């Protein structure tokens, strides 16, 4: 595995998922939020380093979205169990991510040339991920009694669920196009 600074930061973000999850479970929200912020900053840092210092690698292209999905999905899971995020939103997010992972694995296994596979995040995927982070931020603001507007939060939850569904259909359409091209 090519180890460079960008990949090391991504692996660090993956490692942070466990303590963040455990801290959220134990209601130690100040530390959980602090580590979540470190993880978010590390996501920005590894992308910047990979792009600007010629450190893009195949393993990094796999690990970076994996790190994002692990961080968001485990955070969503715990916050849903604790009653902060509606179950339907968690269900939509998990369904989309499991569908994407399954499709990616099938594509990799069926591809005659793994080096030609180009699975990239769509604009809809990026926007829906951004809104998932906004949902988490609103929950953290609520936990610390900084800002509570239940109507705005509900609106963001519904917008996020719609964007996640749009992202799922966008990925499915792109997958179908790649199948038609023979996974080229």
Image (cartoon, helix red, strand yellow):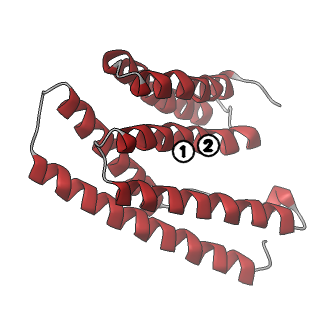
Secondary structure beneath dot 1 equals helix
Residue 160 visible in the picture: yes
Please provide percent x and percent y for residue 176: 65, 79
Q: State whether residue 10 is above or below residue 157.
A: above
Please provide percent x and percent y for residue 119: 66, 59
Residue at x 32% of width, y 58% of height:
160
Drawn side of residue 176 relative to residue 111, left or right: left
Residue at x 54% of width, y 45% of height:
69
Please provide percent x and percent y for residue 38: 44, 21
Pick the front one: 169 or 90? 90
Drawn side of residue 156 relative to residue 13, left or right: left
Drawn side of residue 123 relative to residue 18, left or right: left
Pick the front one: 163 or 88? 88
> For the C terminus, which image quadrant?
bottom right
Quarter-of-image position of residue 88: bottom left
Q: State whether residue 175 is above or below residue 43.
A: below
Residue at x 26% of width, y 31% of height:
140
Q: Residues within 10 Å of mark 1 (few under 14, many from 20)?
A: some
Residue at x 11% of width, y 38% of height:
148
Please provide percent x and percent y for residue 86: 31, 53
> For the N terminus, which image quadrant?
top right
* Mark linked to residue 66: 2
Q: How many marks?
A: 2
* Mark linked to residue 69: 1
* Mark linked to residue 80: none
Residue at the bottom extreme, as displayed: 180
Check contact, mark 2 vs mark 1: CB within 8 A: yes
Residue 118 visible in the picture: no
Q: Residues within 10 Å of mark 2 (few under 14, many from 20)?
A: some
């Amino acid at each position: 595995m090519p180890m460079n600074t960008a990949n090391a930061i991504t692996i660090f973000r993956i490692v942070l998922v466990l303590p963040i999850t455990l801290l959220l479970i134990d209601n130690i929200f100040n530390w959980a939020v602090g580590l979540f912020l470190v993880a978010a900053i590390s996501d920005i840092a590894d992308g910047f380093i990979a792009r600007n210092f010629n450190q893009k690698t195949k393993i990094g292209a796999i690990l970076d979205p994996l790190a994002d999905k692990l961080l968001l999905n485990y955070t969503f899971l715990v916050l849903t169990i604790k009653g902060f995020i509606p179950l339907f939103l968690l269900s939509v997010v998990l369904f989309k991510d499991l569908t994407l992972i399954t499709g990616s694995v099938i594509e990799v296994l069926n591809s005659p040339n793994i080096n030609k596979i180009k699975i990239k995040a769509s604009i809809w995927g990026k926007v829906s991920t951004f809104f998932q982070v906004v949902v988490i931020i609103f929950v953290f603001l609520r936990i610390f009694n900084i800002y509570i507007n239940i109507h705005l939060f509900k609106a963001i939850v519904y917008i996020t669920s719609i964007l996640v569904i749009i992202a799922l259909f966008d990925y499915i359409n792109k997958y179908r196009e790649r199948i038609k091209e023979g996974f080229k």
